[in-house]
Image (cartoon, helix red, strand yellow):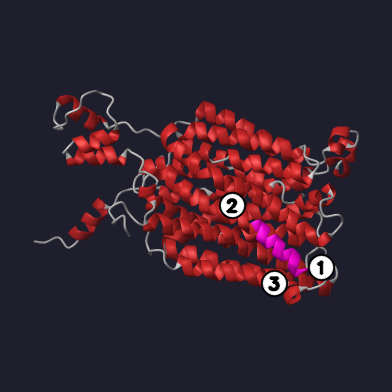
Amino acid sequence: MVDEETPLLHEQQHKKAPTPLPWAQFTILLVLQLAEPLTSQVINPFAPQFIRDSGITHGDETRVGYYVGLMQSIFFATQAMTVLHWSRLSDHLGRKPIIMTGLFGLSLSMYSFGMSTTYWGAVLSRSLNGALNGNVGVLKSMVAEITDSTNLAQAYAYLPIAWASGQALGPAIGGYLSRPTEQFPDVFGNSEFLKEYPYFLACAVPATFSAVAWLVTYLFIHETVSHPLSLRSFIKLRTGKANLQLQNDDASQDTLVEATDDISLKKDIIENKPFPLKALLIPRVIMSAFNYACLALVDITLRSVQPVFFATPVELGGLGLPPYMIGRILSIFGILNGIIQIFFFAKVHNRFGTKRVYIFGLASALVVFASFPVINLLAKVEQEHSWFVWAAVGFQIVTSIIINFSYGCIFIYITASSPNKASLGTVNGLAQVGVSIMRTIGPATANSLFSLSIDKQHHYLGGNLVYVVLAFIACVSLIVADRLPSKAWTHDDDLSS
């Protein structure tokens, strides 16, 4: 008699149960990831005012956006020049020393930025910040290395917590603690130091956090990079079962691969050896990295234009909000983003699949870009910031959260594109180079377009040229996204795919 339930039972038996996340190390990695969004987002609320204070625009309000964009871009320009080198070093020297170097750079540069009184001094500090920081790709590599195929998606569902927290806390810190002698005269009114350096207190908070994170890394983070042979392979070599002729014990892994004819041993050696850079330039790595770059360009242009739009006077096409109010709005976004990502990303991803969620997140940017002129129009019609205006701002904030769903999806694609775990650092580094380039171009281009659009002499497309261009970029990114496979690659797939 044939048991009709046997096929189902067999399927259930072969379905691998999810491995529990290593919460101790994973939680520390999440905290460490907070350092970068905290340091990058803290300047957003006061960046326009800092530009005005520095005197670089000579009182021309339409030039503020241009200089804000340039200052934001310089971080990613220097990061683009160094991030691949840091990532490749992490494959060989280990993740831990590279992370510690990055945290040191973040801390030093933020203290330096807080004491900058000139525009070019601030630019130099941001350059140092980017050049010394290669942690983005390295931390993602560590997450992949402490997880497996059964819990990787779950881990990536939690990654937005760090960025959401940074997006919530950074603007709040920047908005509330900038120019403290004016905002809190009873507490800081007598401080000559803070009068001379009005943005130091806001910058000192993320700088000190990065310093503490450096200490936490030194004491508690476990190194994940290790390229020795496995115990099985070691025993094979020592017992002579591998048909291997070596003249000494210090033979390189390349020598081992060439010398052995044991297929399983050769596979074990290769899986524990980073691929050369040239060998990683395969279609699936390039495709995932290119999509990551497109997503980053769409996202960074939005995040760069948004605070400048909020700070620009209503009559010029903005909303005319003060720094503390901009900080509150961006903080609300960060809090909502964290909550929605934690509770809904994994469910949405499991229901609709990686590619569909990625494309839907990108498509939501079109709605966000269209909302900017609507908000300005309402502000002009209502004159005061009525509930209609705030409802439109709220709609824009909530809709922009959907874009971040795409990040969890593209991280899954990037991790899956790596030929082996030993090459994850370099693969993430390659992807981060493209992202850094886009984030270099994005803020300067977007904010320059914003300044050009609101120029009183030309007022291109009624001041809306910037939103048309950004919507076009989002459409191109959607075309590129359509080239991704419906499911992420596996190690069994052909590397040429």
Q: Residue at x 59, y 59 (%)?
A: 299
Q: Image quarter for residue 355?
A: bottom left
Viewer-nearest residue: 279 or 229: 279
> Percent position (x, y) of residue 400?
62, 62
Secondary structure type for disc 3: helix
Q: Residue tagged by mark 3?
A: 465
**Of pointers 2 and 1, the one earlier in the residue sequence:** 1
Q: Residue tagged by mark 1?
A: 316
Write the start and end of the magenta stretch as one range: 443-455
Q: What's under tag 2, amino acid-wise?
A: Gly
Secondary structure type for disc 1: helix
Q: In the rendered view of the protein, which quadrant contains the C terminus?
A: bottom left
Is the residue 109 above or below the residue 465 in the image? Answer: above
Q: Residue tagged by mark 2?
A: 338
In this rendering, would 116 be left or right of 259? right
Q: What is the total number of numbered labels drawn onto the structure image?
A: 3
